[in-house]
Image: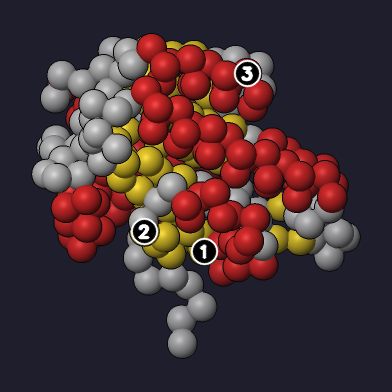
Amino acid sequence: MNAFHSLPMTSIAATVADVLGIEPPRQAEPAIGWLADLLKDKADGKASRAVMYNPDAVAMWLVQNYTGEFAPVFRHTQAAVPLKTVAPAVTPVCFASMYTGTQPSVHGVKKGEKPVVATDSLFDALIRAGKRAAIVAVDGSSMSKIYAGKALDYYFPPYDEEVAQKALELIEQDRYDFISVYTQSYDDAMHLTGTESAVALEAMRSQIRIFEQLALAAEKYYRAHSTLLCFCTDHGVHTKETGGGTHGEEIPEDMNIMHFFGIQPAGL
Ligand SMILES: [Zn+2]
């Protein structure tokens, strides 16, 4: 038995592109065909809106140990897909892989630095297809930096709550075909207080609540569209011998993640 999940997280960029009916990023690894087909089927062909929510560090084992807490995520999605993220499992490396569909050896981000990624990404693919896209991310975060300088709109509020508010506002205004939303309070809390501290678990719940709010807003304001909803974390976490939380090692706790995908069909 392999303790690591078999499907690579690098298949997500092409999968999302396929569901949106656009060409994948140029160097992206192949899409997960059955997943794209399932979602396209549900969308009656393709999705014309997408909200890609990226909560930081929501490990697979959190979904396993606290499954009931994830009920709002299950409620708004139809597919929960176990994936293996890339090594080293640190934030900018993982998000560079998630949106380019490539390994770190291709996109070149190999540690916890935040350079602008030169490799073709889902954002570039969206722009080429004439889609209007935005990144809403915590100021100073990896997602606020590594895809800078593109024909996108960028919103970098100070922290999760303001990120969520801004994303909800943008959904209500229906100004974009694709919105990427990044929040980080679970990652911050678990580094400071441990992976299962009361504070960290409350932060985990807050990430789930943000997804629920985004899904409900999409349900309300994207009624004319088939909408793809994604809950896609970057990496897992583990507990150090000294008790605090961390990540970045090539072990199942850090590498195994679960991504959730759902379609809200038009007109429901
Ligand atoms: Zn992270």
Helix, strand or loop status at disc 3: helix
For badge 3, the amino acid type reads: Glu
| Drawn side of residue 191 relative to residue 159, left or right | right
- Give the farthest residue toward the right: 242
| Drawn side of residue 212 relative to residue 98, left or right | right
| Drawn side of residue 204 relative to residue 70, left or right | right
* Rendered position, 255 above or below 245: below
Q: Residue at x 49, y 21 (%)?
A: 168
| Drawn side of residue 244 relative to residue 142, left or right | right
Q: Position of residue 259 (x, y in %)?
A: 44, 54
Is the residue marked 3 within 8 Å of ligand 1, measured from its CB? no
> In the rendered image, which residue does mark 3 sit on?
162
Q: Nearer the viewer, mark 2 or mark 1?
A: 2
Q: Residue at x 45, y 28 (%)?
A: 217
For badge 1, the amino acid type reads: Asn
Q: Position of residue 216 (x, y in %)?
A: 47, 34
Q: Is tag 3's residue or tag 1's residue first in the polypeptide sequence?
A: 3
Depth check: 265 or 52 in front?
Answer: 265
Q: Residue at x 23, y 26 (%)?
A: 224
**Label 1 crowd bin: few (<14), some (14–19), many (20+), radius 10 Å:** many
Task: State whether residue 250 appears in this view.
Answer: no
Distance from Cα at disc 3 to Cα at disc 2: 28 Å
Distance from Cα at disc 2 to Cα at disc 1: 16 Å
Q: Position of residue 226 (x, y in %)?
A: 24, 36
